[in-house]
Image: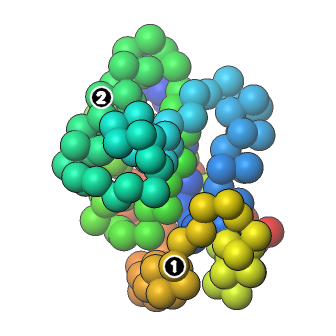
Amino acid sequence: MNNNSIECFLLVGLPASGKSTFSKHLAAFKNAVIISTDSIRKMLYKDETQQGDWKEIERVLHDSIFKSISKGQSVIVDATHTVKEHRKILISLSNRINWTCYFLNTDKETCIKRNLERSRTVPNHVIESMANQLELTPPKKLEGFKKLYEIRP
């Protein structure tokens, strides 16, 4: 890492895979700020279940990342990131960022079970679709990650 670069973290995993819990531990360990698309939705639409306008959410996400790294603050992006093209946009956001990926590879059945125990559930067909997407295009280091860790909780 050069003097102007900053390590940031991209979490990848199905809903209810443990990303938000993991991000809290990682934030404490790495002194990083967590930015989640759920919290952005809550801020914009007063409801994190409201999917809203992705371009608006993405703009706020990118602005938040740039604001943090301009202060020298590492960022953890807490979202599913099951689509390779969406990961690519973040990876190419700034050459100042060295991205480390944590792939929470929790099996689909466990996520569906955990999802039922949450106050805010995701429809099973959405989890199924995301699982299929991750099976086709799991995160790979050659996407542009400096480091990639696969975690099987």
State which mark lies toward you, 1 or 2.
1
- Does residue 141 appear anywhere in the picture? no
Considering the image in quadrants, where does the C terminus appear? bottom right
Viewer-nearest residue: 118 or 16: 118
Viewer-nearest residue: 30 or 121: 121
Q: Is residue 108 left or right of residue 86?
A: right
In the image, residue 4 sits, relative to residue 19, either above or below, namely above
In the image, residue 97 sits, relative to residue 108, either above or below, namely above
Residue hosting label 2: 63
- Please tell me which residue is depicted at 40% across the width and 45% down the height of the picture: 41
- Please tell me which residue is depicted at 34% across the width and 37% down the height of the picture: 44
- Please tell me which residue is depicted at 55% across the width and 54% down the height of the picture: 11
Mark number displayed over residue 123: 1
The location of residue 122, given as percent across then percent down, is 54, 72
Q: Residue furthest top?
A: 71
The location of residue 70, given as percent across then percent down, is 38, 15
Query: Badge 2, how many Cα within 10 Å: few under 14, some, many 20+?
Result: few
The location of residue 16, given as percent across then percent down, is 66, 67
The mark that comes first in sequence, 1 or 2, is 2
User: Regarding mark 2 in the picture, which secondary structure is present there?
Assistant: helix
- Please tell me which residue is depicted at 60% across the width and 61% down the height of the picture: 120
Q: How is the structure coloured here?
A: rainbow
| Amino acid of disc 1 | Pro
Q: Is residue 81 left or right of residue 89?
A: right
User: Regarding mark 1 in the picture, which secondary structure is present there?
Assistant: loop
| Quadrant position of residue 149 | bottom right
Give how far apart the Cα atoms at labels 1 and 2 are.
30 Å
- Does residue 31 appear anywhere in the picture? yes
The location of residue 57, given as percent across then percent down, is 29, 44
| Amino acid of disc 2 | Asp
